[in-house]
Image (tube, grey):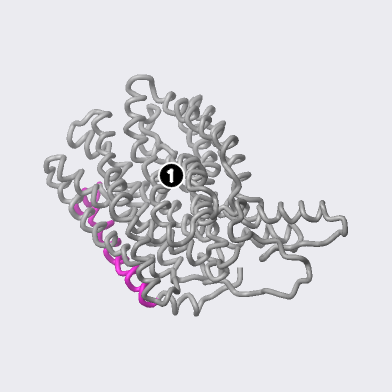
Amino acid sequence: MPGEADENSRLLGNNGHEDHRKLVEFSEDDRDNPRNWRKGRKMVNVGIIALMAGIQQISEDLGSSEYSVVGATTGFVVLLGIGPLILAPLSETFGRRRLYLVCFTIFTLLQVPTALSRNVEMLITVRTISGFFGSVGIANGGGTISDMFRPEERAGIFGWYLLGPLLGPTLGPLFGGLIVQNLGWRWVFWVLSIVCGFNTLMGFLFLKESYAPVILEARRVSYEASSESHTKFRFEGQDDRPFVTKILHSMQRPMRILFTQPIVLTMAIYQAILFGTNYTLFTNFQDIWGDGYGFDTTKVGLMYLGPGLGFLAAVWFIVPRIDTVYNQLTAKNNGEAKPEFRLPLANIGSVSIPIGLFWFAWAVEYHLHWFPTILATFFFGIGQITVFNTVQNYYIDSFSKYAASAIAAGAVFRSIVGGIIPLAAPSLFDSLGYGWGFSMFAFVSLALSPSPLLFYYYGESVRKRFAIQL
């Protein structure tokens, strides 16, 4: 795409070579270029994939131990992290739309055996498998947004997209609790299958392919088929390697990014700790407010609105400023944009997260009124989405063409750690109590909080030192 070569190569090497085939490319005002689509057309895609990424959690057990139900959530979350390692590079080979529709169709169908589960073992198995296919929104959402929106407008849109995967587990327990109380736990999954089925249908009807190489490949094939002189065409960045070679190489891409890029690895660990903390909070809300404060299931569900409102506040008031700061810093840098210009506002989150956690830990420990405890989770929610948004946009700006693989690399740690930590949390709280138990999470987040500031100043030199050819 004209004018976008620099964006696609900040962390990538250059393996260009002379080619005598005619070049297929987007013209400046080409309507097939996803970045030239009408905003309404783009937002249809964003809305569908955001709902695809918005997944609910289990709100009630099956008459078995709470530990087993947390295990079902853990299997789901872990596969949410592993899935993108496969699905993200596949989308960079086959295109976004095809992967979305195949995976979400399977995810929807898997809700049926989940609703019909006869025991916890069946529930854990089906939920774990569904986590893999449900991860398609996480795997490709950032890449899809990168396909359609230019850097100077991307962060604000990405913030609204993130409300899907973040508000899913926040609102899920609230609505799930109401469904469980009135209809029984199986209807949580019947309702989920209905919602997912509707969204999948909308995807088949309205979701458009946004990955430029796939669009240009279709155009290339069309040109060659209609050429009477058998003229050969190519597009910039075309991969002519054998199919199997391309697939095997693409599968390695997320892990290569993760383990060869110190910034990606560090920020992935940071996000993993935040998500582990988030899931620990969510899986202990019932114990804290149900057993500790005597709340019923509906009232406990309302407590999830604390971080949820924090997410909304961040998306409304802070996230749009990420683009503002990015554009201002770019202008001051003689019009040259850098991925590090995404990071300044991450420092808001780096500060509010440990404050919120320390506050929550000791408010619960001393059994203060419920309002101070829920207010603490509000600030944690603000911090989480601010850090998450800035880091994801940093990945996209650094690896534009392979944004999905870069985000998948970060999702591995995030989901695996986020799924495993809640299993160890009950023992931690039994030994230390909620005060020191949640303070441990606060201390870890405090230790990692300087990361965005350090990478803002030194990130460019680190990227240049560890540049890789993908």
Q: Residue at x 58, y 50 (%)?
A: 210
Position of the N terminus, as image quadrant, is bottom right
Q: Residue at x 64, y 59 (%)?
A: 26
Which residue in the rendered view is the most extreme toward the top? Answer: 183
Q: Does residue 138 lie above or below 331 as drawn? A: above
Residue in front for this viewpoint, 50 or 280: 50
Q: In this picture, which residue range is highlighted in magenta?
A: 430-458
Q: Does residue 90 lie above or below 207 as drawn? A: below
Instruction: Say which element carries label 1.
Output: helix
Position of the C terminus, as image quadrant, is bottom right
Image-quadrant location for residue 55: top left
441 within the magenta span: yes
Image-quadrant location for residue 446: bottom left
> 445 left or right of 331?
left
Residue in front for this viewpoint, 375 or 330: 330
Main SS category, magenta section: helix
Q: Kindly identify which residue carries mark 1.
A: 74
Question: Which percent across, then down, holds residue 316?
Answer: 30, 49
Image-quadrant location for residue 341: bottom left
What amino acid does circle 1 point to?
Answer: Thr
Can the viewer see residue 103 in this picture?
A: yes
137 within the magenta span: no
Residue in front for this viewpoint, 374 or 319: 319
Question: Which percent across, then down, holds residue 337?
Answer: 44, 71
Question: Which percent across, then down, holds residue 40?
Answer: 48, 44
Q: Does residue 73 lie above or below 241 as drawn? A: above
How crowded pointer 1 is (Cα within 10 Å; few <14, some 14-19, many 20+) is rated as: many
Can the viewer see residue 79 in this picture?
A: no
Instruction: Tally the numbered discs.
Output: 1
Residue in front for this viewpoint, 378 or 341: 341
